[in-house]
């Protein structure tokens, strides 16, 4: 399909791990991104992964990329209440300056 | 500090009026973008510009206009032709080569009253 797809909601308990999944559209996408949006604010870049990588780790964040299935995931270890936000997956379209965004996954962290 | 500044943060408009949202960046980025975000939805591209004095329509350009007279500035005008303008508007910018990561401003809320 033409859409970047994400589940809309995820709820976890504080201290647990969160895994947010995304399916993207273009097998030739060069970069894939995760953005975080807090209420009423712009999008904050969390991390990105180049398409020739399978995994990228940055402190509590782990990004996994499965190119065969066009599947991207973001794992947040030891999730905190401050991680509650909307998380957007995005892909950079090859030969195009634009990016294609998913609808966002709203993560709720319960104490 | 380097970044993208959008103003105003909140704006109310009467039906039939045009309104212009400001976006300024001091990141020396060549490319700039305007996105619209509706509640519970992803981002939709309105217009983008890869270089000064040039811009292209995105997916939902109808009822909007832009200009790119300076590298640092990319104002968006929401015209009276836009039938459903109430939304959250996000300006963004990126370099033109490499990973092209798009960086966002803090957004502007437009409400039509």
Image (spheres, coloured by chain):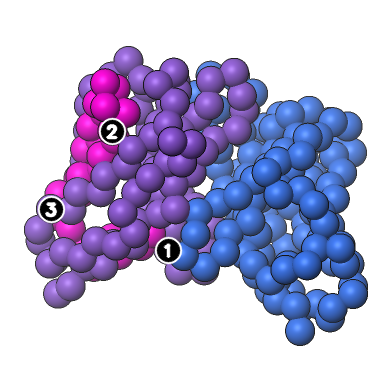
Instruction: Single out the mark in the foreground, 1 or 2.
Output: 2
Asked if residue A78 lies in the magenta stretch, the reply is: yes
Find the residue positioned furthest to the left.
Answer: A16
* Colour of chain A as rendered: purple
The stretch in magenta equals A60-86
The residue that label 3 is drawn on is A17
| Left or right position of B88 against B62 | left
**Residue at mark 2: chain:** A
Chain under numbered label 1: A
Q: CA distance from mark 1 to mark 2?
A: 24 Å
Same chain check for tags 3 and 1: yes
Question: Disc 3 or 1, which lies upstream in sequence?
Answer: 3
Question: Is residue A59 placed above or below A9 in the rendered structure?
Answer: above
- What residue does disc 2 label? A71
For marks 2 and 3, give the CA distance. Answer: 19 Å
Q: Chain of mark 3?
A: A
Left or right of residue B110, residue A90 in this image: left
Please name the residue that numbered disc 1 is placed on.
A38
């Amino acid at each position: 399909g033409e859409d970047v797809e994400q589940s809309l909601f995820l709820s976890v308990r504080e201290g647990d791990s969160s895994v947010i999944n995304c399916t993207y559209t273009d097998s030739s996408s060069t970069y894939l991104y995760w953005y975080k949006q807090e209420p009423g604010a712009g999008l904050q870049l969390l991390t990105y992964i180049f398409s020739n990588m399978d995994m990228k780790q940055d402190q509590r964040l782990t990004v996994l990329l499965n190119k065969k299935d066009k599947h991207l995931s973001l794992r947040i270890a030891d999730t905190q209440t401050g991680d509650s936000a909307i998380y957007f997956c995005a892909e950079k379209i090859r030969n195009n300056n634009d990016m294609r965004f998913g609808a966002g996954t709203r993560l709720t962290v319960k104490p | 500090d380097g970044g993208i500044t959008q103003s105003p943060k909140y704006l109310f408009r009467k039906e039939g009026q045009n309104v212009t949202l400001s976006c300024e960046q001091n990141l020396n980025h060549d490319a700039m973008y305007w996105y619209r975000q509706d509640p519970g939805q992803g981002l939709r591209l309105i217009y983008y510009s890869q270089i000064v004095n040039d811009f292209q329509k995105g997916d939902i350009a109808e009822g909007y206009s832009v200009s790119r007279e300076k590298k640092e500035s990319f104002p968006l005008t929401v015209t009276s032709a836009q039938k459903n303008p109430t939304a959250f508007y996000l300006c963004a910018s990126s370099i033109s080569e490499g990973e092209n990561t798009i960086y966002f401003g803090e957004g502007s809320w437009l409400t039509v009253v």
